[in-house]
Amino acid sequence: MDKTIALYSKGLTEKTTAGLMKLIDALCDRGITIYLNIMDPGGHHFDNDQRVILFGDLNDLPSDVCMILSVGGDGTFLETAMRVRTAGIPVAGINTGRLGFLANIPDDDIGRSIDLLCDGNYELISRSMLEIASPENLFGNGTEIALNEVTVQKADQSMITITVKVDGIFLNTYRADGLIVSSATGSTAYNLSVGGPILSPTDDSIIIIPMSPHNLTVRPIIVTGSSVITLEPGGRSSNCLVTCDSKAVRVPAGTVMEVRQSASRLLTVTTAGNDFFSTLRNKLMWGADPRN
């Protein structure tokens, strides 16, 4: 393994700071050069730490950075992924947050995991991402990228209607509180909380699932990763809320949007004992017997 690693973190809580200190100690013991970015302003704990090199954005990193470690929860991992998605550098997540499907290396497993990473004992997972585009240029970038999901939701108390086409073919007009278009990675995020199916992170399929539908026969549907999904919200309200992971914008009813798989992919890192299926069992407590 090369000798330069970049760390991303945000919101220096007591637990995150402790996790960073433990991580920096472990990396220094292996003689690794460390670059550090604290995404939230005001975090000055590491300003005078001679063991790390502070950097601002991706362009400030040297070309020999071989891995990026996100320190925090899944929210920090998502923000890190969006900042480095064009770099092609693998991302691993150290979990100092709560659930941690993406940031799946527990902070009490840092020492063992760093040994595995430094010795090259890890697996790379190539994850598909979604992009949303609209003539209205909703997010100001032409297209916006999501690792987890794109949603269309009601902006007030009235339900909305969302007309959905797949590759130009009418699928359904959903009457619901909203609709989620999820990647395989996002299947353990918002999709999971509304009863959607779980997909392996290497799957390129796309999930379409309504939120609180006003029709009990409506069910989630999984389409191929090559599908182009057209969304057109309507209803009594004059606007609705569109989200792309953590970004949100209000759009007028009748706005037509297209969601498809992005040409960009994200490389993530998994180590033994922190693989996807182990994470599912541990986080969802599969096999746990409350009688024991």
Image (spheres, rainbow, N blue to C red):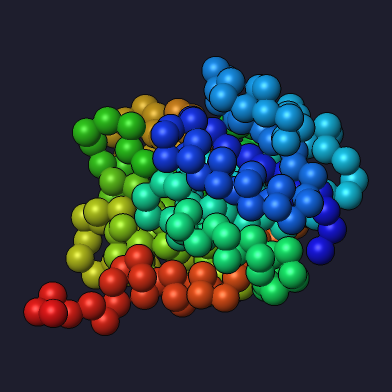
Please indicate whether residue 238 sits to the left or right of residue 223 in the image. Answer: left
Identify the residue at horizontal 55%, vertical 18% (top origin). Answer: 42
Q: Residue furthest front?
A: 29
Q: Residue furthest top?
A: 42
Can residue 214 be seen here? yes
| Residue drawn at the location 67% of the way across and 33% of the way down | 37
Towards the viewer: 6 or 186 = 6
Residue 267: x and y in percent read: 70, 61
The reply to whether residue 142 is visible in this rendering is: no
Image quadrant for the N terminus?
Answer: bottom right
Residue at point 49%, 30% (across, down): 12
Q: Quadrant of residue 214?
A: bottom left
Residue at the spot x=83%, y=34% of the render?
59
Reply above or below: 93 against 63.
below
Q: Quadrant of residue 71?
A: top right
- Of residues 107 and 235, the one drawn nearer to the viewer in this rendering: 107
| Residue 165 in picture, x, y percent from top left | 52, 59
| Front position in the image: 225 or 167 | 225
Vertical arrangement, residue 41 with respect to residue 144, above or below: above
